Amino acid sequence: MSFLLKKSDQNRHATDFLIDKMLYAPAIHCGYYSCFQKIVYILIDYYPDDYDFIQQQIKERRKGSLHGSCIKAFIGRFRPFDRRDALDLDTMLNDLKGFRINSDYNDDEVKPADANKVKEIVDKTHFLIKRHMKV
């Protein structure tokens, strides 16, 4: 098993564990990374030219977001499987990113409802990827 997939799986389990322990901010962090690591794995393993292009663009421009670029490329590759699910995934991944940024960097309370919403998004994201891409 790929190390990225293993990390993705560990972060998904950590999300559940941390929510059970009422540690909501790290739960959100782990939930986001469980999805991000899975899509990076898919890009590297199945669409390496896309991933190499992203890396090259970031290096040349010295700006841009690895996360945003990977999400965009992944959604582009997912769209032929199911357009509606691709739209849902795009929304969910960007929502997860927003939850993670708020949780990691803002001086705001992270509430149980936020962590539970993230868990719901994480579970649905992994489900749709597995259903359509078998990963």
Image (cartoon, grey):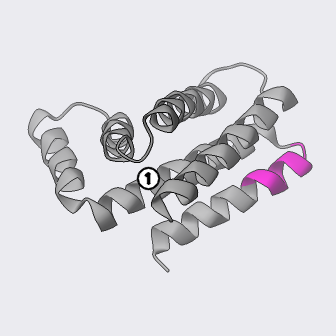
Task: Kindly state the secondary structure of the residue where label 1 is placed.
Answer: helix
Task: Check disc 1 and give the amino acid type.
Answer: Ile
Q: Is residue 60 left or right of residue 6?
A: left
Residue situated in front as seen by the camera: 25 or 122: 122
Q: Is residue 113 above or below residue 133?
A: above
Q: Position of residue 103 (x, y in %)?
A: 66, 30
Tell me if I can see residue 132 in this picture. Answer: yes
Q: Is residue 80 left or right of residue 13?
A: left
Q: Is residue 72 left or right of residue 15?
A: left
Q: Is residue 64 magenta?
A: no
| Image quadrant in which you'd find residue 101 | top right
Q: Is residue 18 magenta?
A: yes
- Callout 1: 10 Å neighbours few (<14), some, many (20+)? many
Residue sitting at x 56%, y 57%:
131
Give the labeled residue for mark 1: 39
Q: Position of residue 119 (x, y in %)?
A: 74, 42
Residue sitting at x 74%, y 51%:
15
Farthest bottom residue in view = 1
User: From which residue to which does the magenta span run?
Assistant: 15-22
